[in-house]
Amino acid sequence: MANTTQPIKNREDVERLKNYYLTTKRNLRNYALTVVGLNTALRVRDILSLKWESVYDFDKETFRERLETKEKKTGKYQDIALNNSIVLALSMLFEEKKPGAEDFIFPGRGGNALSRYQAFRIIKNAAQELSLGDHISCHSLRKTFGYHAYKMGISPALLMEIFNHSSYSTTKRYLGLNQDEKDEVFRKINL
C-alpha cells in the first residue's frame, strides 16, 4: 500500500493544493483542473476529455447544473451536480479564455486535450512544492473526494456507486483507511 496513490486526508492540505495554482502560480487552467478533480470523483482521463459545452450552455450563457459524461474506463454514464467550487473555478477560467463550445476545458499545446502525463506533472509538482508526500498524483484527487465524503458520513455503498466500483474492497482502498482511523473507532466506542 505504501507505493500506491493516496488521498489527501488533511483538509488544510486540500485547500493548499487547490490554491497553489490560484495564488502561488496563477494558472487558472491548473487551478480549475485541481478543483474539478477534487469535486467530481472522475478519473483524470475523463476530466481531460471534457469540452466547454458539457458544463456551459452557450445559448443561455450560463453554467449547467449538471455534467453528464460517459466514463472511458467503464463505459458507464455519470450524472454529476456542479457544485459552487466547480462553477467558480470554471467561471474564472471561462472569463480568461473566452472559449467556444467545442474547445477542451483543459487544453494542452495546440488546443488538443491536455495529456494525462501533463496533468500528472501539474498535480505532482504542486504536491512536491507543498510537501504533501510522494504518493500524490491525479488519482489522489479522486481518492480525496471519496475520503472526505466518507468522513462526512456518506455511506461506502453510495461511494461505491459514485466511483462505479464493482466491489466494496476497491472502494475501501480508495478511502485510504488505515490503522489510525480504526483505532479512533475503538477509542470512541468506549462501552
Image: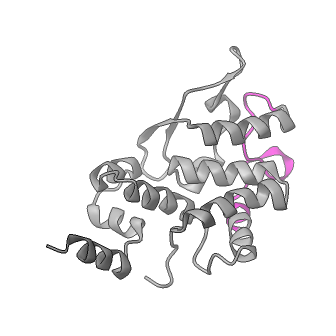
Label tally = 0
Q: Residue at the spot x=80%, y=48% of the render?
A: 28
Seen from the viewer's position, the closer of residues 169 and 48 is: 169
Residue 10 occupies quadrant: bottom right
Q: Toward the viewer: 129 or 79?
A: 129
Q: Position of residue 86 (x, y in %)?
A: 63, 41
Q: If the image is split into quadrants, where does the C terminus sit?
A: bottom left
Q: Main secondary structure of the magenta part?
A: loop
Residue 102 rendering spot, x and y as whole percentages? 73, 31
**Identity of the residue furthest to the bottom in this view:** 2
Looking at this view, is 156 or 97 the one in front?
A: 156
From the viewer's perspective, is 78 left or right of 18?
left
* Residue 26 falls within the magenta-colored stretch: no
Residue at 37% across / 70% down in the picture?
173
Q: Can residue 116 be seen by looking at this rendering? A: no
Q: Residue furthest left?
A: 191
Which residue extends farthest top?
Answer: 59
Res. 78 image quadrant: top left
Provide the residue span drawn in magenta.
99-120
Q: Is residue 175 above or below residue 99?
A: below
State yes or no: residue 111 in magenta: yes
Query: Looking at the image, which residue is at 29% across and 67% down?
Result: 169
Residue 3 percent across, percent down from the top left: 51, 83
Left or right for 32, reference 47: right
In the displayed structure, would residue 45 be above or below residue 75? below
Of residue 71 and residue 131, the one placed in the foreground of this image is 131
> Residue 27 at x, y = what percent?
83, 53
Report if residue 73 is visible in the image. yes
The answer to whether residue 96 is left or right of residue 69 is: right
Considering the image in quadrants, where does the N terminus appear?
bottom left
**Coloration mode:** one colour
